[in-house]
Amino acid sequence: MKFYEGIEKIKYEGSKSTNPLSFKFYNPDEIIAGKTMREQLRFAMSYWHTMCAEGTDMFGAGTINKNYGSSDPMDSAKRKAYAAIELMDKLDIDYFCFHDRDIAPEADTLRETNQRLDVITDLLEELMKEHGKKVLWGTANCFGNKRYMHGAGTAPNADVFAFAAAQIKKAIEITVRLGGEGYVFWGGREGYETLLNTNMSLELDNMARLMTMARDYARSIGFKGDFYIEPKPKEPTKHQYDFDASTVLGFLRKYGLEKDFKLNIEANHATLAAHTFQHEVRVATDNNAFGSIDANQGDMLLGWDTDQFPTNVYDTTMCMYEILKAGGFTKGGLNFDAKTRRGSNTFEDISHSYIAGMDAFALGLRMADKIIKDGTIDKFVADRYASYNSGIGKKIIDGTATIAELEEYALNMGDVSTNISGKQEYLENVLNSIMFS
Ligand code: XUL
Ligand code: CO
């Protein structure tokens, strides 16, 4: 069975190549910053967008058929697994990420649904072994079914909580069976529409209870990977509890989950929260909580999660700059949580999209390495804070200065005599000079 006819394995041909089905910047075996590009970037395919989503939106039906030649749901799910592996082979992608419901369709009962999951997990396990493919992370879709209309772990109805717990237990089991290196919690409908009907404190306690149970169970069956929370401020609910990286860190610390849980930062979620992508990555790395990336981009003129393939090289550069400075990925990677536009409705468009995203991050990695090697920006930042290296500044950092001592110091100072320019525009041009030289 072949599904991507006419698409051969994509190879690196360099920036001069005119072959649209080739990598211009992603050269998997080339060493950048001490590791191969393949090891640095750890690309993953998102099963939901790539294998499942058919381009529906609020105003219209799908524009691309993804039943893979069968209208029987389980037969189609099996074909989808073959198609997924074929596409990953052709794009030279080692990892994939999935929700339980992406790989096998829900049946009438949970028991039957779980049996379906077992059938597809068996198949995927076999195909993954044969083709050398791996799971970056798994997750449970606890938001699509109407039972989750008020949330899953944060639902006001304990039966819904129990159902979500059962679903997550099974999703963890199959993630572990497939050797997944991570397990993601993205809020889904964990949030609220109005506080008039919401006990926010109980809902947050319950969300933590569910994650604690999930963690304990996963560890008990040998899961050694990382758990991730994926922040998002809004959509589908008006207020998502996992608002942004800082909010999630506060939540993890309040409930004692910070040792097992890290952050999966998504570019489009960062901008929805009115942050830059780089800001969210920085908050995660600064707090030793960086885990993984959902690689995509939004549209400045649209206020929702458009999940476009990332092509903005400034953003990929600053993302990889933060990641390289923090020591690179460990268990995480770059998952393309991205979909082709509704009007890009062919399997060839899917290949072009992945090539664009992978090349944009390959460029980002190359640029980030140049910025770090050049050193101008890092030195500028270090120098900007040099007043903390000696004298009163050092005392502040060491924690030996008292507020009374600082008063004394200030009284004798007269006034602050030197305030050095932040040189933003100079630095922006330094960045361009490094990137485009
Ligand atoms: C939704 C989103 C999800 C998560 C996994 O905005 O990003 O696809 O990545 O549930
Ligand atoms: Co995501």
Image (cartoon, rainbow, N blue to C red):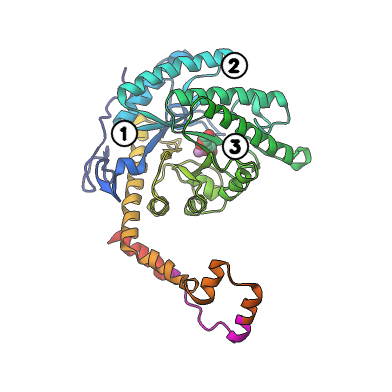
Crowding around mark 1 (Cα neighbors within 10 Å: few <14, some 14 to 19, many 20+) is: many
Marks 3 and 1 sit apart, C-alpha to C-alpha, by 30 Å
Q: Is residue 122 left or right of residue 171?
A: left
Asked if the stretch drawn in magenta spans residue 99, the answer is no
Q: Residue at x 33, y 22 (%)?
A: 129
Crowding around mark 3 (Cα neighbors within 10 Å: few <14, some 14 to 19, many 20+) is: many
Q: Residue at x 22, y 46 (%)?
A: 14
Crowding around mark 2 (Cα neighbors within 10 Å: few <14, some 14 to 19, many 20+) is: few
Asked if disc 3 and disc 1 are in contact, CB closer than 8 Å, the reply is no
Q: Tell me which numbered mark, 1 or 2, is placed earlier along the sequence.
A: 1
Residue 48 position, x and y percent, is 47, 30
Q: Is residue 398 left or right of residue 5?
A: right
**Mark sitting on residue 110:** 2
**Mark sitting on residue 242:** none
Reading the image, the residue beneath label 1 is 91
Instruction: Identify which residue, 247 or 436, lies in the foreground.
Output: 247
Q: Which residues are magenta?
A: 409-425
Reading the image, the residue beneath label 3 is 187
